[in-house]
Image (spheres, grey):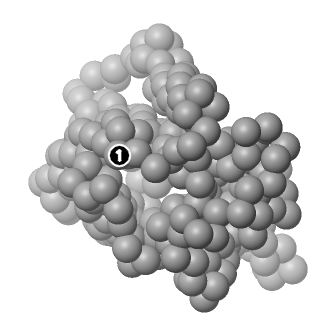
Amino acid sequence: FGMTTNINFASDAHSNAQLVNAFIALQLIGQFGLFVIVLTAVASPNIKRNPTWYTFCVGWILSCVSYTFVFLIGQQDSPTFGACVTQAAGIYAAPVLTSLTTLSFAMDMLLDVRAASAHSPLKRSRTITIALLVIPFFVWIVMFVGFLVFGVKNPSLVGKGPNGTYCDLNTFIPSKITGLISVLATIVILLIQGYIGVRLFKNRHLLQDRRLAAMAIRIMIFSLLGALALGIGFAYVLFSAQGPEFDIITALLPIGSVIIFGTHFDLFDVWLFWRQPRSSSSQTRYPKSASIKSIPTP
């Protein structure tokens, strides 16, 4: 196959127009929402976020781009081989990126929660911080290139998926690899979130602090998102083909991230710039320790 050859994959997929449109719309909403959140955080000097927060959001944006790639370049109905194999590589590498960036963010929170509860300040190694930021994207690039080369060398395996929503590879090997990595990462994420939740519960007298209370709620919601991701990972590992429900759940994950990460007062203060800013007294009604302030905002 030539990289620019248009191939009709309709015979390989049972395309459902409503499913395809819903899937793409949900992915685009998540992509746009996360982009606006990141852009707002970067542009506003009053919004402070940890670096792993940015890599988490960027990871999910890249995931959305992967799932909507052929649509974004105007080839959803009849993609060229080059576009299709690129998307196939992207959608298999994307779960690895999102699970690892989520793991990095969870580990960042864990380290700061432990530091906040320590009697003496704990200094974070710069190497650890760099590793949390770099490793997810390094693994993602390696996986993407590997799947891309595999697809180019096996063009007969490249085509639209069974639901017609995106291009994939007609072999179970890639999904098993990415599914296993995602499952392992998500299990660790849930364990970390459980540990953080226990720490917050043991210090529940501090939940009068609005920031800590909001964090506890977000961690619980974040855990539900992680449970969904774990289910998707198991589906990749256990089943060769996934039904339409699988695609919809996959598309809902980035929207869940938008809800969790986009519902912060500091973001609303920027978006609703015409409103009078909240008074400092309303933001600091309860005393906050320096240790609590050091915990990254989820």
State the residue in front, 232 or 112: 232
Please say whether residue 283 is visible from this viewpoint.
Answer: no
Q: Position of residue 170 (x, y in %)?
A: 46, 50
Task: Please state which amino acid type lies under the numbered disc 1.
Answer: Phe
Q: Quick one: label 1, few (<14), some, or many (20+) residues within 10 Å?
A: some
Residue at 68% across, 42% down: 86
Front-most of residues 109 and 86: 86
Taking 25 as reference, is 124 above or below it? above
Among the 4 quarters of the image, the one containing residue 123: top left
Q: Is residue 174 shown above or below 139?
A: below
Residue 20: give x, y in percent of width and height: 61, 77
How many numbered dots are placed on residues in this image?
Answer: 1
Q: Say which residue label 1 marks.
A: 172
Residue visible at 26% across and 58% down in the picture: 239
Any part of residue 118 in sight: yes
158 vs 279: above or below: above
Residue 226 lies, with reference to residue 93, above or below; the image says: below
Give the secondary structure at mark 1: helix
Q: Residue furthest bottom?
A: 18
Q: In front here: 66 or 203?
A: 66
Question: Which quadrant of the figure contains the N terminus?
Answer: top right
Dividing the picture into quarters, in which one does residue 25 lie? bottom right
Please name the residue shown 63% across and 85% down the image.
17
Residue occupying the point 68% across, 49% down: 84
